[in-house]
Amino acid sequence: MAIFFLSCAKDGDVNLIRTDTCERVGTYAPPGEKSPAISAVDITFDSKYVVTAGADGRLCFYTFDGELIYALVHGGILKFVEFNQKPGEQNMVVTCNDKFKGQGEVSPNRIMVWGFDPSKRSMGGAKKLSSKAEDEPLLVIDEDLPMKATKVKWGAFDETLISIFEEGTVIIWNAETGKKVELIQAHTSPVTSLNFSQDRMVMITASKDMTAKLWAMDKLECIQTYKTDRPLNDATISPLYDDKSNPKMHVLLGGGQDAKDVTTTGSGAGKFEALLWHMVYEEEIGSVKGHFGPLNTISWLQDGRGFITGGEDGYVRVHHFDPDYFTSKKFE
């Protein structure tokens, strides 16, 4: 069975790539001559639908085969999008956007929830671009939003929305009413990333303050802190951390020197390696070199046998662990 992953970038390309061979299978192209910068891409659990968030303020929905279903005029500068997490009923997406003032458009900083029902659209029809009047959001959080959100994701059971901010805070919202549930002063510098365990009961955040933190979502408390020697852009939890036969209590961290300073230092001084840390002992196990620019994103393979990194250098690198990772005691 072929396994794929999706990548997106500021050049507007959204690529579908085979994990085993790193062969690009196809691309997802929005309407128009020039593709906008794409800040985020997500796919449903059943791999039937793909959504992209563009800097031009449009949400584009595709079939997995690459056919555009429709493009929704969202407004603002889109920063993130994610499908809701209910298997078999992924009929919503959550988004966040930066404010934008243009000709006839004034969009404030917002977090929004939109419905998604491909059956209401003619996938082969001529009209692919919807309007704001045709598509009304299910939820808008703007007046209560203290500053622009960097990313926003669904909490456990789709009951909450969890957003991160450049002020070092994490805010949890009620996904139905949009009311603020909790504000956490998580870091002392901008929070750059949040990711979860599969059940979304454990969260990890990364920050420019050179730390990543592990959070228990039932009590909303920090349970582990990983102090590194570099600004972090992403952190993620191994899907095998709770495996019954061979658990891997590991997290991956990545970042490095700011892109504006990269030309003045070598790859070693810039600290662009991917870091493997023990989840419980808070110790670095090892590092993997490769990128010659800041590491922007990092993701485990679904089976936990490797990981994928994307860097400011424009490269996506796929790493597969050696058999020692599963047999050597130093990786326990």
Image (cartoon, grey):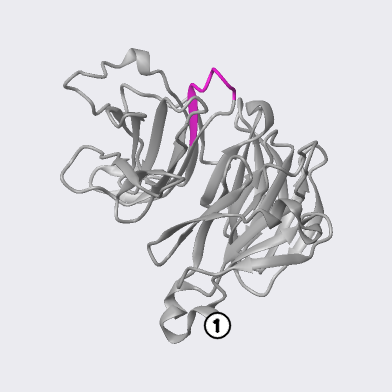
- Comparing 136 with 86, the one in front is 86
- Comparing 330 with 187, the one in front is 330
Vertical arrangement, residue 224 with respect to residue 33, above or below: below
* Residue placed furthest toward the top: 119
Query: Where residue 51 sits: x, y (%)?
Result: 40, 34
Relative side of 274 to 318, left or right: right
Vertical arrangement, residue 63 with respect to residue 153, above or below: above
- Residue type, numbered disc 1: Ala
Q: Residue at x 63, y 27 (%)?
A: 158
What's drawn in magenta, residue-wise?
A: 86-94
**Which secondary structure lies at badge 1?**
helix
Residue 185 seen from this side: no
Relative side of 123 to 166, left or right: left
- Comparing 141 with 166, the one in front is 166
Query: Where residue 88 sits: x, y (%)?
Result: 54, 17
Q: Quadrant of the C terminus?
A: bottom right
- Comparing 315 with 98, the one in front is 315
Residue 184 seen from this side: yes
Query: Where residue 125 sits: x, y (%)?
Result: 19, 18
Q: Main secondary structure of the magenta part?
A: loop
Vertical arrangement, residue 87 with respect to residue 326, above or below: above
Name the residue that disc number 1 marks: 269
Q: Quadrant of residue 255?
A: bottom right
Q: Is residue 284 magenta?
A: no
* Residue placed furthest toward the bottom: 264
Query: Where residue 118 sits: x, y (%)?
Result: 37, 18
Relative side of 261 to 244, left or right: left
Q: Quadrant of residue 27?
A: top left
Q: Residue at x 33, y 46 (%)?
A: 24
Q: Residue at x 66, y 53 (%)?
A: 323
